[in-house]
Image: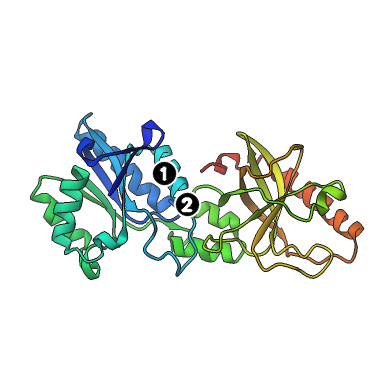
Amino acid sequence: MTVFDLQNTNKQMTAEKIPATVTALGTFDGVHIGHAALLREACTLASSLGSDVFPAVWTFFEPPFRGRVKYLTTLQEKLSLFARAGIRYVFLEEFSNVQMLPPKDFVSKILLAGCGVRGAVCGFNFRFGHSAMGTPAFLQKELANAHAPVLITQKVTQGDEAVSSTRIRALLDAGDTEYAAQCLGRYYSVSLPVVHGKELGRKIGIPTINQNFPLERQTPLRGTYASTVSVDGVLYPGVTNVGIRPSITENDSHTPNAETHIIGYRGWLYDKSIRVYFRHRLRDEQVFPSLDAMKAQIARDIDASNASFHEHKELCYG
């Protein structure tokens, strides 16, 4: 197991240095508003147990479902969001190391011996140990023997449905980035290296940056979005097309791509990792009959993105 101290720029630590913790347990893909409830409870419980007890998270290096579904957050994004929520330590585990552990051993060897647990927080549907036989009730019973309280959070809803990573992926598949933001607590975003493209935008006076989605990363529905772009800590309005770059001809690539015009920015960003937040969907991806038609539509997209840029700027983080 690897441990990070988030107050020391994600410094890696040895288990021998770990103090007493209240640890939130889960996969935390997306670190959505349901997960945020667990993190808040961990911070509150740790504070109530004394200044020498710290809030922590136990999770995986890679989600157990990796390869079967698209992921919403990278490990580095998770660490940043945990730190923002007030978490001090993160325990990162390989799924293969714990999938066959009996639940009783998970509690004694992983939580008590490995994480210094003096309290724990989990969701109502948390499962652990061999064949997922461990339940929140079992966790409460086992940790009670160590005088460690366990808080079980109930489902968090948005609208009339429970918030989950599965629901958020479905919303992004449908292009509903606004509702996804309500479930995440922030706009969905990616931070990816800027790569070379056709440079057609630069030739017509509307320069763009190109970023390729990793195949395992969740992408919003193909189309054009009002976006916000973070460059060196400064937020700019943007227009982002998600798709396979059809422009004025049929596509020549099947690699998911985000092509973004950063409104009001001029500079070279090749090879830098730039974060793009998807605010709301403007239209479907289009094949234009001419450059003039494309320029006219992009001008309308720019006006639409500018008009909504200052709304909900607090949702652009993480």
> Badge 2 is on which residue?
74
Residue 13: which numbered mark, if any? none
- Asked which quadrant contains residue 248, the reply is bottom right
Q: Residue at x 80, y 52 (%)?
A: 199
Q: Nearer the viewer, residue 41 or 113?
A: 113
Residue 183 coordinates in the image, percent (x, y): 49, 54
Question: In the image, is 126 to the left or to the right of 268?
Answer: left
Residue 125 coordinates in the image, percent (x, y): 30, 62
> Badge 1 is on which residue?
79
Asked which secondary structure carries label 2, the reply is: loop
Asked which secondary structure carries label 1, the reply is: helix
Asked whether the residues under the numbered discs 2 and 1 touch, taking CB atoms below 8 Å apart as contact, a structural biologist would say: no
Near mark 1 (Cα within 10 A), the count class, few <14, some 14-19 or many ≥20, is many
Q: Which residue type carries mark 2?
A: Thr
Q: Is residue 146 above or below residue 267?
A: below
Q: Nearer the viewer, residue 314 or 237?
A: 237
Q: Residue at x 74, y 54 (%)?
A: 197
Residue 26 coordinates in the image, percent (x, y): 32, 55
Residue 121 coordinates in the image, percent (x, y): 26, 49
Question: In the image, is 80 to the left or to the right of 314?
Answer: left
Q: Which residue type carries mark 1?
A: Leu
Q: Nearer the viewer, residue 45 or 103?
A: 103
Determine if residue 149 is in view: no
Q: Nearer the viewer, residue 258 or 94?
A: 94
The Cα atoms of the two marked residues, 2 and 1, are separated by 9 Å
- Asked which quadrant contains residue 312, the reply is top right
